[in-house]
Each structure stands twice: as C-alpha cells, then as structure tokens.
Amino acid sequence: MAEHTVKAFDSEISQLRGLIAEMGGLAEVAIRDAVDALARHDEDKAKQIVAADARIDALEAEVDRLAVRVIALRAPMADDLRDVIAALKISGVIERIGDYAKNIAKRVGHMEGRAKIGPLTLVPAMAEIAQGMVRDVLNAYGARDSLLAIEVINRDEKLDNFYNSLFRNLVTHMMENPATISSAAQLLFVARNLERIGDHATNVAEMVYFAATGQYFSEKDGPRDTSGVV
Amino acid sequence: MAEHTVKAFDSEISQLRGLIAEMGGLAEVAIRDAVDALARHDEDKAKQIVAADARIDALEAEVDRLAVRVIALRAPMADDLRDVIAALKISGVIERIGDYAKNIAKRVGHMEGRAKIGPLTLVPAMAEIAQGMVRDVLNAYGARDSLLAIEVINRDEKLDNFYNSLFRNLVTHMMENPATISSAAQLLFVARNLERIGDHATNVAEMVYFAATGQYFSEKDGPRDTSGVV
C-alpha cells in the first residue's frame, strides 16, 4: 500500500477497535445491570437494558459496514486482513454477549415468589466472574496482550464450576419448593446465560491470543462448552 | 475483474456455497439425530453426534479460510464482496446451530426417570419444525429464493408458541413430580435450544432475503428472541 493508504488503513483499524471497545463496554455494563435488576426486582431498569441492547446491535452493524469498506477500498493483505476479519468476528460475539444480558433482563418480570429462592443470592457473584472475563478480554484485545488472554481462558473453568454448583442448588430448591418452580426455572436460564457469556469471552480470548502470537491456543471447536452438567 | 479472474471468482463462490450446503446438511441431521437419541435414550448415538460436530466446525474454518483468500486475491467489489461476507456470516450461524444440536445430544445421558416425563413425547414434533426451518433456509440460500426465506421467517412464531407451551407443560410436570425435576430441567434446555435454532434459521433467512432483494426484511436486532416466556 502507498504511504497515504497505509495511514488511512491504520486510522480505519483504530476506528474499528474503538467501536469494538465501545460495544464491549456496553455489554459489560448490561451484564452487571441485568443481574442487579434481577437481584433487586427492578422491572424499569430491566426494560432500559432491553432497550439499550439496540445500541450494541447498531454498533455491530457499523463495524460490519466499516470492515467491508476497508476490505473493498484498501484490499489489505495477510496480517492486516486478519485484523479486519478478527474485528468482524469479535463484534459478532460481543453482540451475542449483549443478547445474553438482554435475555437475563427479560426474565426479571417472571420471578414470582423470588424472595423465597435462596440460590438467587448466588447469581451476582457468578455474574461478576462473567463480567470480569468480558472486561479483561476487551483489555487484552485493546493491548494485544496474549498473557491476559490466557488468564481469561483459564478463568472459564471457575465459571463452569459455579454454574454446575448453582444448577444443583436450584434443582434441590425446586424439589423442596414446588410453588416457586417456574421462577427457579428462570434462574436456571440466567445461570446458563452467564455460563455462555464466559464461553464467548473465552472464544474472543482465543482469537486475541491468535492475533497476538500467530498460533492457535487450542483446537477451535466453536463456542466452548466445558460445563459438566451440560 | 479480468475474465479469467471472474471465472475463478465464480468458481470460488460456488465452492463457498457448496461448503455451506454441506454444513447445513450436517447440522440438520444433527438436530434430528439428537432428538431421536433423546427420545430413545440412545447414549451411543448421542456420543456420535457430539463427535460429528467437529466436522461442522472444520467446515466453518474452511469457509473462513477460503473467504479470506477470495477477498485477498480477487478484491471483489459491491455485490460480490457482500456475497463473500454473507458466506462468512452464514457459516458462523450454522456452526452455532450445530452446537445447539450437540448440546441436546450431551443431555441424553442426564435423563434419569425419563419414562415418567410426559412432555418428552412433545419434543420430536418441536424438533421437526426447527429442522424444517434449517432445511428450507438452506434451500432458500442455495436458490436465492426470497419467498421461501419469508416463509421460514414466518414459521418462527409457530416454533415460539410451541416452546412457550412446552415450557408451561414442563413446569407443571415438575410441580407434580419433584423426583424427576433434574431431568425435566434438562428438557427445558432442550426446548430452549430448539427455539434458538429457529431464531438462528430466521436470521439466516433475513440475510438470504437481503442478498436476494437488496432490502432489509426488518430491523436487525441480533438473533431474534420473540418467545414470550423468555
């Protein structure tokens, strides 16, 4: 590429990274707020989170448009092309993370008898792990930090263990409290959504590792699903 | 593009479409087999489905590689570039559909007391709708058939209604049969996975509609999630 083209390309790549950082920040906040709305039974906040997800979707569309334009105008090669494709893929994953947070928010209004569901008090701690994985994988992406990426990947096991334990807790609770089964079932999905957020953060971490080192961290097998209970 | 480049490009696009058709066929079979294994408690078959998912993942990686090569070598513009990007996105969605089928298969071994769970008998009919949506959206993609794409989009509501009804059924069953709550909870996830497969087929249908007509079918808002129960 000619020098002015290189400069334009660099500025466009920065713009892509900026959009992804913005998406990630919104997704992270959405996770925290959704679980907070769930814990405090705040239906208004839940509605705001559902509405705010449209902004994440719009940012993904912007990343798509910009990435396609960069490819079309600059015809980047090798590493540069890989950078653009990575932006396309990562924005898709963050959009899904936003969807999981939105889905948690949607359940806030379906929690009749929630005060009696003891395991609900465990959810914020689980959410904090998931949210931290999203925050750190975005930092790793921004800084091309392969060590931080590995750290995120390793944290997924902790989240899976939390999920397995919460699943068992909820099933026991259901057996003993048939009256709140419907609400406890909503919490099963919430726990599963948080577990999936961790899987997706782990996938992004693997992409960041690859981009930073040129090597695959492990065999790619789609969003990881290592939780024992399934 | 020069004539020989155009020919090479056309052949590469055909190759991409062929890979996607192969992925879609495998995902469709995986859905049917997973629910069949669940209904007949066939743990061996379930294991085969989990193992077979690696082939879908490998095909996605092949689509990615080929798409990136096509972009790098041919620098396609406008419609052609959109075609390649669509292939990249659609392969990602099919990979996820395969993951949902794999996840259903993984639950086969966790269904203690399954004979007593009446709602289990409803799952194959729900799976048939989801599987049909995947099959038809792939046909719509292959034939660039916008009418068939609309038909798939409209079918999603039926699947959502099925999900809502099955969810209520399962919760009622749980209340009346505390001993099988753990297995019934697995079925909640199975139903949810099938519902998500429909959402993803709908998303592909919207992409097919866009590719065929140049117009958006509806506002994009990520994988659709229109089921009432959440």
Image (tube, coloured by chain):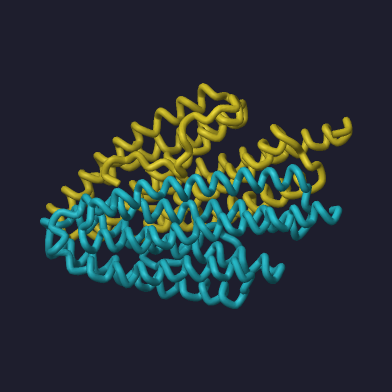
Chain colours: A yellow, B cyan
The percent position of residue A28, horizontal first and vertical second, equals 50, 41
The percent position of residue B89, horizontal first and vertical second, equals 59, 53
Relative to B109, A221 lies left or right: right
Q: In which quadrant of the rendered image does the C terminus of chain B lie? A: bottom left
Q: Nearer the viewer, residue A104 or A37?
A: A104
> Residue A107's quadrant in the figure?
bottom left
> Residue A31's quadrant in the figure?
top left
Judge whether B230 appears above or below B106 on screen: below
Relative to B40, B2 lies left or right: right
The percent position of residue A102, horizontal first and vertical second, equals 47, 53
- Residue A23 visible in the shown view: yes
The percent position of residue B215, horizontal first and vertical second, equals 69, 69
Look at 29% across and 67% down and name the residue there. B123
Relative to B209, B227 lies left or right: left
Q: Nearer the viewer, residue A209 or B216?
A: A209
Give the farthest residue toward the top. Answer: A147
Judge whether B154 appears above or below A198 on screen: below
How many marks the image carries: the answer is 0
Look at 56% across and 55% down and name the residue there. B19
- Residue A14 visible in the shown view: no
Q: Nearer the viewer, residue B66 or B126?
A: B66
